[in-house]
Image (cartoon, rainbow, N blue to C red):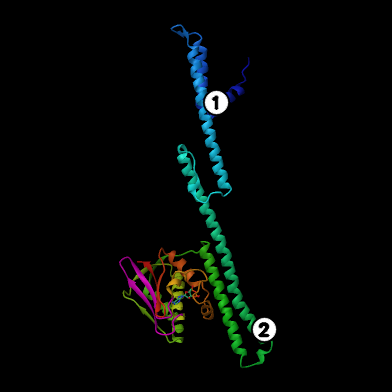
Amino acid sequence: MVINSKALKNIFNNIFSSRFFGSGIFAASALLFFICSFSFSINGYNIIYLFVIILIFDIAIHFIISKKRNTEIEKIKNVIQSIRNNNFTSPDEILLDKSLAGLQEEIQAMFLKSKNDIDNLKRLERVRTEFLGNVSHELRTPIFAIQGFLETLLDGAIDDPKVNKSFLKKANNHTENLNQLLNDLIDISMIESGEMHLSFRYFNIKEFLEQIVFEIKHLAEEKNIELLLLHGNENLQLFGDKNKLKQVMINLIQNAIKYTEQGKVEVIIEEKDKFAKIIVKDSGIGIAKENLNRIFERFYRVDKDRSRAIGGTGLGLAIAKHIIEAHSSKIEVDSDLGKGSTFWFNLKK
Ligand code: ADP
């Protein structure tokens, strides 16, 4: 008989790649033993009987193990199918035999991870839809107002010296709001897509805040509010991105002025061991406790109409929160309704 080398290779491969690899080895050695046993006998008994018993025993064990394994594989298949059909709500519902505790844990962990990933995707989708709804709404408000003023002017108000200038001024204010909203939207989308690049360096915090207070002072003066900068160490150097921190400070101080009718706004530098606390404190309308943790959400305003009327976009604090977090810090707030609010964050020395 000619033994084809390819066929031999196949048999060899089959034996070694089979999941009953152990039985393959056993069968091969049993065959060898069977051939040799023809020439041996112990106490007159041909050793072939011993071989037959061992072979039957092996077949029985093999049969029992395969059956158990098939049942286990069937269970695993069912579990996988149930996961695919979304039949489970919690990983604890995924149960296999005790002997497969390790595999059960792995499947439970995999289920939990994909469940979290899916939940996250759904949440992001909801946030995206909500965000688009908010953006459309926010854009519509100033556009409608501008349209309204222009139409009234075109319908004849342009020739009425009592209103023509004020209508044009109002339309112009709304274009400014629109511009601010677009700038804030660009900022927030850059931040959230990870495109905000910060450039950290040491700078003199007192000089930095002095310049900002100087630039904004006229807003406080228009409302008869005192704007003060309180500092200690003249030469204190802090670490951060000056441009981005300027945006945060302008938002906090402008808010403090916007939401204060009388009294003062204080910008305070409190030096600590390894950092300094930057505080913006006002004596304004304050924020109710239940709204405190929501004011950093995009477009959240305690009083929408009031905020819009004074040129707010509802994005300022959301942007400030991102910028301060990019400095490995956190922006915090405390407030007493009717008495005033205090916002603060830390910067490294
Ligand atoms: P806006 O452009 O409306 O000011 P922000 O994101 O800057 O948006 O602030 C969100 C909301 O938080 C504001 O609409 C206002 O209701 C509230 N808020 C922020 N700062 C103050 C403050 N200093 N005093 C009272 N309310 C404030």
* Kind of element beneath mark 1: helix
Res 151 label: 2
Indicate yes or no whether the magenta region holds residue 113: no
Residue drawn at (47%, 80%) of the image: 258
Amino acid identity at mark 1 = Ile
Ligand 1 closer than 8 Å to the CB at disc 2? no
Res 15 label: 1
Q: How much space separates mark 1 and mark 2, taking CA atoms?
A: 88 Å
Ligand 1 closer than 8 Å to the CB at disc 1? no
Residue drawn at (57%, 27%) of the image: 14
Which span is picked out in magenta?
259-287
Lower sequence index among marks 1 and 2: 1
Residue furthest toward the top?
Answer: 44
Height in image: 191 above or below 180? above
Q: Which is more toward the observer, 282 or 328?
A: 282
* Kind of element beneath mark 2: helix
Amino acid identity at mark 2 = Glu
- Residue 20: image x %, image y %? 52, 28
Q: Quadrant of residue 125?
A: bottom right
